[in-house]
Amino acid sequence: MVAEGFKVDLDKPLVFQVGHLGEAYQEWVHQPIPTKEGPRFFESDFWEFLTRTVWWAIPTIWLPVVCYSISTSIHMGCTVPEVALIVAFGIFIWTLMEYTLHRFLFHIHTTSYWGNTFHYLLHGCHHKHPMDGLRLVFPPAATAILLVPLWKLVKSLATPTAAPALFGGALLGYVVYDVTHYYLHHGQPTIGVPKSLKVDKLSVWEDAFRSLLVSLVKFLN
Ligand SMILES: [Zn+2]
Ligand SMILES: [Zn+2]
């Protein structure tokens, strides 16, 4: 499937093209196109719709689930200070999960057709089009699917009364992360972050933050 000298046509849907880049995919995906206009991913309008998410859909859809989960633990007998502690622990678990996913899955080196295609959909598109405002936060349909194994994992780790709050905490950590990440790319910070730095060097900062986190984890161990 590796085509020598294959060129991606940016005017056509991208998802089923990028796989043909083969070995050249890694280099291509790390040359960002910093325009706000997002490319078309799929020919089909249905699949195309699923790849575009407005940022405010994330808190709108998931914060009610967070509240419901946390209140379930309270109704089952957890005290408020206990719940606060469990939620904080859930946020910590999310942070570790995000770091692990980014470190080991999001930057996996692919060269095969389906490997490249999968990588592009999962995370490559964010590095190729870092300013595409509708391809930054994680699509809720995909999150909903991933919440099923997360809930199973949490249930196996925590007591029945603590499990909902732990789940809610991890989900809250995700919501805060996704919204903050969106703001870092698209917000207009008035202090501290110069515009050029914001657009060009953001991924460097993101990586530096993750390194800091892993040092902290090593230190705590
Ligand atoms: Zn990345
Ligand atoms: Zn980013």
Image: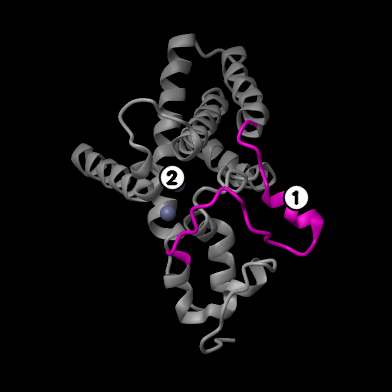
- Secondary structure at badge 1 equals helix
Task: Find residue 188 and report its horizontal and vertical position in percent.
Answer: 45, 30
Do labels 2 and 1 touch, CB within 8 Å?
no
Residue, x 25% and y 42% (percent of image)? 212
Q: Tell me the tag on residue 49.
A: 1
Residue, x 28% and y 46% (percent of image)? 208
- Which quadrant is the C terminus positioned in? top left
| Type of amino acid under label 1 | Phe
| Type of amino acid under label 2 | Met
Q: Residues within 10 Å of mark 2 (few under 14, many from 20)?
A: some
Q: Does the residue labelled 2 lie within 8 Å of ligand 1?
A: no
Vertical side of 197 occupied by 68: above or below:
above
140 left or right of 90?
A: right
| Corner quadrant of residue 91 | top left
Q: Give the main secondary structure of the magenta stretch.
A: loop
Which of the two discs, 2 and 1, labels the residue nearer the N terminus? Answer: 1
Foreground of the two, 27 or 196: 196
Residue, x 40% and y 59% (percent of image)? 104
Q: Nearer the viewer, mark 2 or mark 1?
A: 1
Q: Does the residue labelled 1 lie within 8 Å of ligand 2?
A: no
Q: How crowded is mark 1: few (under 14 residues within 10 Å), some or many (20 or more)?
A: few
Foreground of the two, 168 or 52: 52
The stretch in magenta equals 29-56
Q: Tell me the tag on residue 75.
A: none
Q: Tell me the tag on residue 97.
A: 2
Is-magenta flag for residue 18?
no
| Corner quadrant of residue 116 | bottom right
Foreground of the two, 176 or 37: 37
Vertical side of 40 occupied by 156: above or below:
above
Q: Residue furthest right?
A: 45
Task: Find residue 19 and report its horizontal and vertical position in percent.
Answer: 58, 75
